[in-house]
Structures are given as structure tokens and as C-alpha cells.
Amino acid sequence: IAGITQAPTSQILAAGRRMTLRCTQDMRHNAMYWYRQDLGLGLRLIHYSNTAGTTGKGEVPDGYSVSRANTDDFPLTLASAVPSQTSVYFCASSKSHGNEQFFGPGTRLTVL
Amino acid sequence: GEDVEQSLFLSVREGDSSVINCTYTDSSSTYLYWYKQEPGAGLQLLTYIFSNMDMKQDQRLTVLLNKKDKHLSLRIADTQTGDSAIYFCAESRQSGAGSYQLTFGKGTKLSVIP
């Protein structure tokens, strides 16, 4: 692994289903972030983690949860997906909060 | 409302200079960033400027910061078709005690006409 990876690349999901988007980084960065990107709205922060064991809410946290059990992984879970969660999801990491962020390639999620 | 603002579209001819503008609101921002997003890809850091600097140049890229007006610009010299992408301005903003986050603009889509 080099940098930051996300899985899956894309997913079509039925409304009401549970889904976990995976994010892994091998840069030993302390801080990690989840954004969603929607046309006309730019990037909006969903949740973040400044260090392993801690998480915080961003601008649009409702319907999403995260965990940060270790430094490398930061999964994003949709407990019961709704169509409004159709979006492109980007994971990012930084050496510490406020530093330049490195982005993953994104996960395109469609909720029907 | 949108705290970091950018125009949504810019179209230039190949070989000309492109100037992408951004305004932000938090005068305490420590760093300001420019990211580039190519179609179907994630965001890639292009350059950044520390808040105590007025200008930063890196090859074809020039960043100008007017802290008084809270205005940031990115100039791309000799624009090429490969520069076609969406460019995001972002500011590093304090979100709590000792905690900082990036706030992004909506992005400027640069189209380069051959």
C-alpha cells in the first residue's frame, strides 16, 4: 500500500441496507477525515479523527458513524442508507490536524 | 452560507495564463491551500501558502495572498490542456481548542481550449 486507499471503488446499494466504506493509510498520519462531494456543494466534512481512539463530528454527520481503533484505518458506516447519501466519498489523512491533507481516490456510492 | 468562495467556472485558451480567485472569512487561518481534482480522481495538493507570506511561486504556479482583503489567487502560467480540472481553495481553520480543520470552497472548473 502506498499512501491512502479506499474500498470499494463504487457501490450500488438498496435503501435501508448497512454499508461500511473502508479507508486505510500507511503514512502513519495522526489525523483522518471523511468528506462527501456533491455537485454544486463542493466537499463537506462528515467526521474526522485527530488521533487514534478519538473521533469528531464534521458539518454533515447525521446518518454516518466512524471508528478509529488504530492509526491506519478509519471506516465510515452508513447504518441504514438513504438515497440522499448518494455521493462520492473521499477519505483523507494528514500528519496532524490542520496540516495538508492527502486524499484517497474516492468511493462512488449510489443508494436506490 | 459558504465561507470559502470561488467562481465555479473558468475558461482559457491553451498558452494563456489562468487566474483562479478565492475569498475566505477566517482572518486567523494559518495555511491556505490549493488542490486540483482531475475527472474521476481524488484531490491532489498543488501548493499552499502560510498566512505570513504574500506570494509563493512554484514553477508555473504563483499563489498571491492578500490577507487584508482575505483574498487568495492561483495563477497558472502557460496553461496546458492537462491543467483542465477542478481547483479547490481551502483554509485551515481552528475548530476547537488546539484543533484545526480544512474548509473547502466549492471548486472552480478550469477548461482549457486548445
Image (spheres, rainbow, N blue to C red):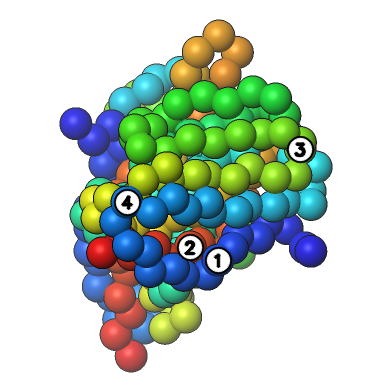
Badge 3 or badge 1: first in the primary sequence: 1
Q: Are labels 2 and 1 on one chain? A: yes
Q: Is residue B48 above or below residue B36?
A: above
Q: Is residue B105 above or below residue A14?
A: above
In the image, what residue type sits under mark 4? Answer: Gly
- Farthest front residue? A16
Q: Point out the frontmost of discs 4 and 2.
A: 4
Q: Are labels 2 and 3 on one chain? A: yes
Q: Estimate the spatial distance between the alpha carbons at disc 2 and disc 1, rounded to whole Å.
A: 6 Å
The residue where tag 4 is placed is: A16
Task: Tell me which residue sits at (34%, 58%) in the image.
Answer: A87
Q: Point out the frontmost of discs 3 and 1.
A: 1
Q: Is residue B113 left or right of residue B62?
A: left
**Front residue of A47 and B72:** A47
Q: Estimate the spatial distance between the alpha carbons at disc 4 and disc 2, rounded to whole Å.
A: 19 Å
Q: Are labels 4 and 1 on one chain? A: yes
- x and y percentages locating residue A106 in the rendered image: 50, 62
The residue where tag 3 is placed is: A71
